[in-house]
Image (cartoon, grey):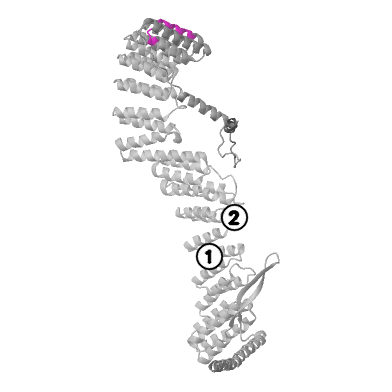
Amino acid sequence: RMASTAAGKQRIPKVAKVKNKAPAEVQITAEQLLREAKERELELLPPPPKQKITDKEELNDYKLRKRKAFEDNIRKNRTIISNWIKYAQWEESLEEIQRARSIYERALDVEHRNVTLWLKYAEMEMKNRQINHARNIWDRAITILPRANQFWYKYTYMEEMLGNPAGCRQVFERWMEWEPEEQAWHSYINFELRYKEVDKARSIYERYILLVHPEVKNWIKYARFEEKHGYIAHGRKVYERAVEFFGEDHIEENLFVAFAKFEEAQKEFERARVIYKYSLDRIPKQEAQQLFKHYTMFEKKFGDRRGIEDVIVSKRRFQYEEEVKANPHNYDAWFDYLRLVENDADVDTVRDVYERAIANIPPIQEKRHWRRYIYLWINYALYEELEVKDPERTRQVYQACLDLIPHKKFTFAKMWLLYAQFEIRQKNLQAARKTMGTAIGKCPKNKLLKGYIELELQLREFDRCRKLYEKYLEFSPENCTTWIKFAELETILGDTERARAIFELAIGQPRLDMPEVLWKSYIDFEIEQEEYENTRSLYKRLLQRTQHVKVWISYAKFELSVEDPERLQRCRQVFEDANKSLRTCEVKEERLLLLESWRDFEGEFGTDATIERVRKLLPEKVKKRRKLTSEDGSDAGWEEYYDYIFPEDAANQPNRKLLAMVKLWKKQQMVEEAPEEEGEADGAEKESKQS
């Protein structure tokens, strides 16, 4: 019993306790397990034992078993062609050719469109020197699968290796009837060339490129074939036929490059140049990059400097033509194109490009769109005048341009002025004045009036200038520059009274664009005339209109500059008046600027008393804070700024007294606290000594 219980205890398996029951990070699928089992089964499978056959019976038994195995495999799946091929190759290895042939035939019954099966079958016949059988197989194969090129290549190769060129040619002819790919035709041509049949190769090329594959590269190969065999005239004829064949609609640059290189190799440089130029005139620029490249190289090798420049210019012309075709309103491209043709082309070509350029009128009648366009007309007119020296045509260009511009919406004063200056150069003053009069009548502009006045000034027609200034001021009475120029003209002519009257009229205008410049010019005019009383009167009139600090300072400097014994007193009086006047000025920096100028004046010309007096007038700089408010009215914090407190301001006197009293009280407090601190310190010392 004890033994049985012990044995029973041993048979009971121990259950392992799994602490971590979470799934593993890497999971193994059932598919992986099966695959690994299959792989290990193959690894562990022992190789079959080597068998030595000693007599015929054993051999027959071996053959029987192998054939049974092959037949079983075929019976399982007839469509696996590799089983048929292995079976046939095994029979072939036993020199059972008839049996192997039977297996191949059975396989062809199953899958007659399998290329590999036909190839293996024919190779077996060729290995065993069964030539007629092999021919039979190839014939059947190319009949069933005429598009399988391997059959044709193998068949022709076999016939050629057998020394049967006639039979090989016959196979090639049968093949060519199916119009195969290009390589097949080249194989046929190379076959004929191996037998020195150049005429037959030429006839194949003719059929090949005219009927089946009429591509440019094949024409080029045909021409090179003729060139290689020394038929130069035939090669040139092929290139010419190719150009005619493709025409101008399907033209390609590769054909012309090859044609030109052919002529270059024959030392026919002029022919090559003509070919390059002919092709460049007909092929679009974006499709002729290689053509340009080879033409440039050709000219560098065989041309002169002019020829190279022509190539480069021609290339750039193509580029510009493409740009302006893509966007006719790209005026910058037209400018570059015109600059190119002006340097290298004849007059008619340049005019033609100009006419094409100016025909692209901006589609929108807004001046900003016309600004670049109008320079095409200007350049055209200048070209006709300066380069061609044709004044009548130049006049027509100017008139056509002026007729084209919509003057009711906008105009170009530059164009009117250039036309008038041109007529003056042609000594036709009446036409120039008529042009400017028309311009002012149609579209009066400041630049037009100013330019017309300058023209008349250069011609020394001062009466006309006066009339023009009057019209100008009627048109734009607020223009201070015109008033000043008009007065300057009268001053130069020596009529000071007219100049003064013009200034008086000017400052009396209710609206002026730069009144300060006008007043300054009037004052400078009176100073030049040494009319100091008039100048003082002008300053006083100006100060009635404005209390600007710069006017006061200028007035003081004027009084200082006048050679007079009382000039210092007058200048000081101006500063005094200015200081009184600017007390009510809100901008305290202007008052400070005045006092600083006064201080500098007294420092140079005054006494100690006057310097001290001005110093007492200088303000005190105080830092203050003010509350900021944002746009929506909310509180935006505080900011610091500097303010100036002037001693003379009555409103600030109480504040200054209060500040002074605060400072005095603070000083007294500091003085009183000092003795108390000293007494406390003495008591502390005594206590320390006693301890």
Q: Can you say whether 119 is above or below 616 in the image? A: above
The amino acid type found where label 2 is placed reads Cys
- Frontmost of labels 1 and 2 is 2
Q: Residue furthest right?
A: 633
In-front residue for pair 397/523 = 523
Q: Can you say whether 369 is above or below 554 in the image? A: above
* Earlier sequence position, callout 1 versus callout 2: 2
Position of 172 compared to 527: left or right? left
Q: Residue 135, how many percent across, how many down?
A: 39, 7
Bin the neighbour count of mark 2 within 10 Å (Cα to Cα): few under 14, some 14-19, many 20 and up: some
Q: Residue at x 44, y 31 (%)?
A: 282
Q: Residue furthest front?
A: 1
Q: Can you say whether 297 is above or below 185 in the image? A: below
User: Is residue 100 at least partly visible in the picture?
Assistant: no
The amino acid type found where label 1 is placed reads Asp
User: Per the image, is 101 magenta?
Assistant: yes
User: Is residue 365 at least partly visible in the picture?
Assistant: yes
Instruction: Describe the element under mark 1 as helix, strand or loop.
Output: helix
Name the disc covering residue 463, or none: 1
Q: Residue at x 33, y 20 (%)?
A: 234
In-front residue for pair 390/415 = 415
Q: Residue 690, how many percent across, how many down?
A: 55, 94
Which quadrant would residue 149 be assigned to in this image?
Answer: top left
Which residues are drawn in magenta? 92-108
Which quadrant would residue 280 be assigned to in this image?
Answer: top left
Residue for badge 2: 443
Q: Residue 216, how many percent across, how many down?
A: 41, 25
